[in-house]
């Protein structure tokens, strides 16, 4: 069973209905809701989204996060993950946290629109939601 780790930008695509990425991001979440695969993100993603959406009524943010938690797991962002990130030294530290949390959660895929910002070392497949769908359904 695939284990999909959702990067912040993919969840923001859904929450903000960002064109043209919204449909593919929603479809990937639907795969998780349908139990075709498992899904996770990190608490830092939720924190980042809450900050980005700070002009939105907090009760709406809590409601959305509650719905996401019905089917998305929260991958650990602990000392092991932080230390691995510090050792990796990606240009974007937040991407490093996401990558190491995905690896620790044993993700098979990290879904992001910033594929080029992550190493292509084969530990897990880093791809966009559109590419994941095309490969899965193709």
Image (cartoon, helix red, strand yellow):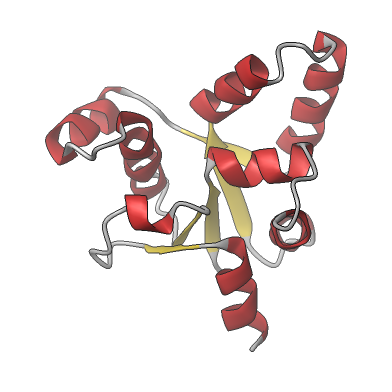
Q: Quadrant of residue 124?
A: bottom left
Q: Position of residue 100 (x, y in %)?
A: 32, 41
Name the residue at the left extreme.
Answer: 87
Q: Position of residue 58 (x, y in %)?
A: 80, 10
Query: For this rendering, which residue is in front, 65 or 20?
Result: 20
Q: Quadrant of the N terminus?
A: bottom right
Query: For this rendering, which residue is in front, 23 or 46?
Result: 23
Left or right of residue 127: residue 100: left
Q: Quadrant of residue 86?
A: top left
Left or right of residue 117: residue 131: right
Q: Residue at x 28, y 62 (%)?
A: 123
Q: Residue at x 19, y 28 (%)?
A: 83
Left or right of residue 61: residue 76: left
Q: Quadrant of the C terminus?
A: bottom right
Residue 87 showing in the rendered view? yes
Name the residue at the bottom extreme.
Answer: 138
């Amino acid at each position: 069973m695939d284990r999909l780790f959702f990067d912040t930008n993919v969840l923001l695509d859904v929450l903000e209905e960002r064109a043209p990425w919204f449909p593919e991001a929603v479809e990937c979440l639907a795969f998780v809701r349908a139990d075709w695969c498992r899904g996770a993100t990190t608490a830092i993603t939720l924190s980042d989204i809450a900050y980005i959406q700070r002009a939105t009524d907090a009760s709406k943010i809590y409601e959305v996060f509650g719905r996401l938690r019905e089917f998305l797991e929260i991958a650990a962002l602990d000392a092991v993950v932080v230390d691995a990130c510090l050792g990796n030294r990606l240009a974007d530290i937040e991407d490093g946290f996401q990558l190491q949390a995905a690896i620790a959660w044993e993700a098979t895929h990290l879904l992001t629109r910033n594929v080029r910002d992550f190493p292509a070392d084969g530990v897990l497949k880093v791809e966009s939601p559109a590419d994941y769908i095309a490969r899965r359904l193709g």
